[in-house]
Amino acid sequence: MEWSGIDVDQFGKVPQRIRHRLHHHPLFSTEALGRLIEATDRNNYYVNTMDISAHNARSRREGEIRNLSGVEAIEAVAKGRLWILLLQPEKFVPEYRDLVREIYAEIAAHVPGFEPFGEKLSILISSPRIQVYYHCDVPGQTLWQVRGSKQVYVYPNKAPWIHQPSLERIMLGEKHEISMPYERAFDEAATVYDLQPGEMLHWPLNAPHRIVNNDCLNVSFTTEHYTRDIRRSFIVHCGNGVLRQQLGLKEKALSRQTEGPNYWSKAAVAAAWKLSGMQKKRRQTFKVDFAVDPSAPDCVRTIPAYEFSK
């Protein structure tokens, strides 16, 4: 990464764009990604299609990849309306684990006091003009552009751009990340990036964001991580979520302090909630109703719907 001109004291506090060279890495060639798709089991990928003309999260559909080579699947993405997310690639190609370790070792070497854990890497392959709807993530996030380009909208991580009760339900595993309320007027406060190959974005914790691909195939990857402060923030949100539900607090703003008696009281609430068995399992059920088919319109062929859990 190119750290010259980067204010490392602001890392994780403001949106930052940093140059990198990983768009030349052999792990992200079409052939390597094709082999990865073929090796990835059903529990470790999502394939979606969606409305590209509006911000319509309800239009998102879940599909399957079957009877295609990995390269054929990528070719379908290039001409269709598809979004593929490959999770835990290191389970199938160990070199990705080496890569994520190298990435975080370099960040830690440049950012004083940065001590991450729980690092993960996921790969995104998506069609021209595909969207990633407005959402926020639980851990710390970085987004690395490998191929193609996209518009990335990053919003302030505070009200009204973050709806605190929705964020708490996401932390508790009760809601999907894209359930965060969005209004078009929010865009007035967004920092907008035209992300190009060889560029990485990092933004403040839980900062909402959305993405619109330019008219080209996109390949990118995300990394996620925790730190002591991120972990404490997660605990506080869980504690607030439990208190909000038990006490009927609805829209009331709750303290998000991560130090002192207030933090420890929320931590006790979160721990009691977890030990009580009230914690909802994060296993999700999806309705799969299309297959990736290069001969179908938008490379999306509707199939009889079935449910799939993971």
Image: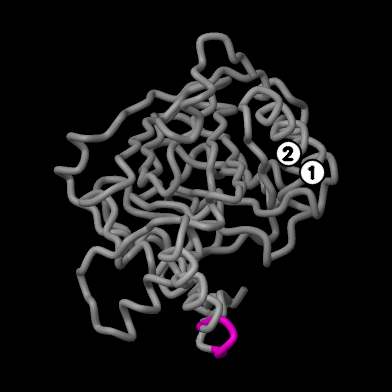
Q: Residue at x 59, y 77 (%)?
A: 309
Which numbered marker is on residue 272? none
Q: Which residue is mark 1?
A: 97
In the image, which residues are magenta?
A: 273-277
Mark 2–mark 1 Cα distance, whole angstroms, equals 5 Å
In front here: 153 or 111? 111
What is the x, y in percent for residue 43? 68, 66
Q: Residue at x 58, y 76 (%)?
A: 283
Work out whether residue 145 can be spotted: yes
What is the x, y in percent for residue 274? 56, 81
Q: Amino acid at mark 2?
A: Val
Position of 21 compared to 276: left or right? right
What is the x, y in percent for residue 222? 58, 41
Residue count near mark 2 (Cα–Cα under 10 Å), binned few <14, some 14–19, many ≥20: some
In front here: 286 or 194? 194
Asked if marks 2 and 1 touch (Cβ < 8 Å), the reply is yes
In the rendered image, residue 262 lying in the magenta stretch gets the answer no
